Image (cartoon, rainbow, N blue to C red):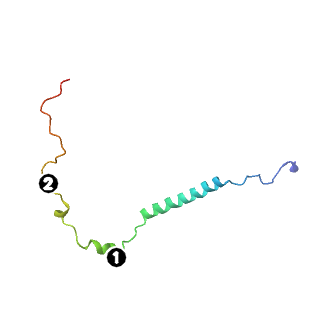
C-alpha cells in the first residue's frame, strides 16, 4: 500500500514572459500604493526654503477682484417678445 502513493513533486510549467511581467508589475503596484499611503500618514517637515518664500503675506485686498465692474458684453440681452408656441 505504501508503494501506491506518489510523493514526487508535481510538474509545474515554467512561467511565461507575460506571467512574469504581470507578477512583477503587481508587486511594483503594491509597493507604489504602500509608499503613497505612508506619504499621507507620515508627516514630512517643510524645508527651510519653502518657509522663506511666503515671508510677505498676501493682503485680502490684492486677491479680491473688483465687484463694481460693468456687466460683461458676452451676455445676450433678454428678448422683449415671448416665443409663440
Label disc, if present, on residue 58 of the rendered structure: none
- SS at badge 1: helix
Residue position marked by numbered label 1 in the rendering: 48
Residue position marked by numbered label 2 in the rendering: 67
Direction top: furthest residue = 85
Image: 54 above or below 11: below
Kindly indicate whether the residue at mark 1 contacts the one at mark 2 (C-beta within 8 angstroms): no
Q: Nearer the viewer, residue 6 or 83?
A: 83
What is the x, y in percent for residue 28?
55, 60
Q: Give the residue drawn at x 57%, y 58%.
A: 27
Res. 64 image quadrant: bottom left
Res. 77 image quadrant: top left
Q: Nearer the viewer, residue 42 or 3?
A: 42
Q: Is 14 positioned to the left or the right of 52 in the image?
A: right
- SS at badge 2: loop
Q: Is 4 positioned to the left or the right of 54 in the image?
A: right
Q: Give the residue drawn at x 23%, y 72%.
A: 56
Image: 77 above or below 45: above
What is the x, y in percent for residue 12?
74, 52
Amino acid at each position: 500500500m505504501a508503494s501506491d502513493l506518489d510523493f514526487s513533486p508535481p510538474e509545474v510549467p515554467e512561467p511565461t514572459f507575460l506571467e512574469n511581467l504581470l507578477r512583477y508589475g503587481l508587486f511594483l503596484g503594491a509597493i507604489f500604493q504602500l509608499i503613497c499611503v505612508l506619504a499621507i500618514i507620515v508627516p514630512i517637515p517643510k524645508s527651510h526654503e519653502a518657509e522663506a518664500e511666503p515671508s510677505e503675506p498676501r493682503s485680502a485686498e490684492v486677491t479680491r477682484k473688483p465687484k463694481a465692474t460693468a456687466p460683461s458684453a458676452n451676455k445676450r440681452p433678454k428678448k422683449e417678445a415671448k416665443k409663440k408656441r
